[in-house]
Amino acid sequence: MAEFWSNNDRSYYIRLWVDQVSQNIAENSSQVRVRLALTNGAHTFADYSCTASVTVDGQTLSWSGMPSMLSQYSSIMLIDETVTIGHNADGTKTFNLSATFSGGGGWSPGSLTIGGNSFTLSTIPRSSSVSVSAGVIGSSVTININRQSSSFKHTVRYKWAGKSGTIASNVDTSTSWTIPFDFANDIPNSASGTGTIYVDTYSGSTKTGTQSTTLTASVPASIKPTFSGVTLSDLNSAAQNLIPNFDTFIQVISNIKVGFNGAVGSYGSSITGYYAEIIGKNQSTSSNGGSLGIMNYHGIIKIRARVSDSRGRWSDTREVSVTVLEYFAPALSFSIARTGSTSSTLTVTRNAKVAPLTVSGSQRNTMTLTFKVARLGTNDFTVNNGQATGAWSSISNLTNSRANLAGNYLANQSWVVIGILEDRFTRTEFMINVATESVVFSYDRSGVGVNKIREQGALDVKGDIYANDQPIQQYQLTNADGGLSRGSAQWDDVWNKQATEFGWRSGKYDDNPTGKNGEWGLYQNFWLDDWKGVQFFTSLDSKRFFFRTYNNKEWRPSQWKEVATIQETVKREVDLGWFIKGNITRIGNMVTISTVRKITSLDTLSDYREVKETIPAGFRPAQEVNFALQGISDSTVTGTAILHLASDGKIRLTSKSPGNKYWTGTITYVTSDPYP
């Protein structure tokens, strides 16, 4: 109950009582009793027309009459009514109230008022709150309800990706629910999703409100993509045709292609990734139909594969074992002896071997041996179809096997024999020079032969030549015309040569002093003995000159040393931007720039802003440098600016000093540009 009093008029007051009588939960309302009485002190009155009213939450209760108040310190009840007041949707309610009394004049009271007051009703319990923990699709979650009244019942509903339905009805404070598996179909690209749990609160049959909470549900680990296996094939068609087995491949030759079979997502997901690897070999592929790479090893290997889906889930792995057969390039060597009564038959002692590539006891690799013969000094080779030539499918090697070449090879002529050994994939060659029949001395009208039959030149000698008990030079340093050419392939030769040799070298090897893949140049190697010597290299393009020495296989110095050359001084005038000019000078690999005296204005506020001018080629810095300029006005430094000079010649400006100034500065830096 609450009590309120009015103002005092000659000891008259009005008194207001407000009582909360009862509440109707279903109707979300309360019954409120309102009473208004007139009280007096020492003054009395009678037979005057009076009015009174009470306003409660916008409802007005009125009274009128001619009361008789003849006793001092008495009270007359004017209004005593019970009204219904509705609550807010959340069950709360606070309302305003006021009261008035107006007398009829004379001895009756004047205007009495009660205003500016409020009354708060007890909150009527409404909708219950709900909570639920994160769940896993296909598993049970508990939905907890915090109800406002023990009499409340609830209906629990869900909403998920456009789906909705009732979970349970007539629920008190909790219910368990198994999240349907088909919820996973609605989140094919994610491992979790969110929905909403609703709780409708009922008081009897009346719905008093609804509250909701977010449900987060994840796809269980058991829902993942699957595939039925892999199909292995060989990207090398020749190897595939030779050995069509899906589980047998060839070292170095094969490149395994992996196809994934029957790959499907689960509950709406799609296949987005593939992965296969050779276990322990750091070789893999991430595409369907991708290859694992060349295998430079042999034996049993395992290939492990898996697929991934749009949820980022990986399938279970599958493994398959395959055999990699050992493979090596064909190996051939042979010797030739002159036989027969006239020493004109060439007998070959053959040593040849190819990789056998045996599958299920069967040798799959074919060994083919061919010989070609030409007169020494010519390139007119003819294939020889004698007994030494042949093809074998049942064997993979020949050891000291002797056979004759077809034809007669005169004893007074030298021959070149080339043997070619081939298998199904590669080939190798071996060459032997067959000398004339061994004699002490021979001659004909064109010249003399020593220790052999003369074939070429005025003097044709087999063996070293001595003069005054000393050997004369046995090795050719130049061509017959004095040129330094060492043959068509000398540029590709190695650098560590135990011979005095001149020729060209490329940048194929790291030894090149200008770096691997560097410049071509003239190579000069002077070999003394026991790996003592010196090498010189002159680059073809930049004309740089290097040397290094060696002793007992140790390089001294370990790296090449460059012999410096004095370059001419080159001068230019260049534009540096915003009408600033500079005198630029290059000596060797050093460049100096000094500004030309001129007044100009940098009418810009710049921070590393590129200008249109550039540093010309031949003068550009090896790495970016910062050229600091000072702006001078009336002999006073009034500003600074920086020109950022890049290695590609671009100029960028940083400045906050506009206005006419004499800009001055000098910078020196290193360049690696070719000489201008």
Image (spheres, rainbow, N blue to C red):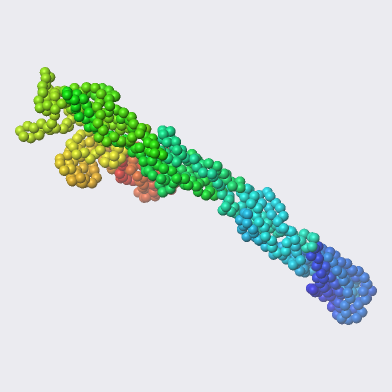
Q: Is residue 199 visible?
A: yes
State the count of labels.
0
Horizontally, residue 543 falls left or right of residue 450, namely right
| Residue under the image location 39 percent in, 44 percent down | 299
| Residue at 38 percent of width and 47 percent of height | 642
Q: Position of residue 340 (x, y in %)?
A: 19, 25
Would residue 594 be seen by someone viewing this image from the given angle? no
| Residue 529, quarter of picture | top left
Q: Is residue 539 left or right of residue 111?
A: left
Q: In terms of depth relative to the viewer, which is nearer, 232 or 112?
A: 232
The residue under the point 84% across, 78% down is: 11
Seen in the picture, residue 613 relative to 226 is either above or below; the reply is above
359 is higher (above) or lower (below) than 412: below
Determine the image quadrant of residue 145.
Answer: bottom right
| 560, 619: nearer the viewer | 560
Tell me if 38 is positioned left or right of 557 in this view.
right
Q: Which residue of the protein is positioned furthest toward the top in this rendering? A: 445
Looking at the image, the residue that sits furthest to the left is 468
Q: Which quadrant, please, contains the C terminus?
A: top left
Q: Residue at x 57, y 45 (%)?
A: 265
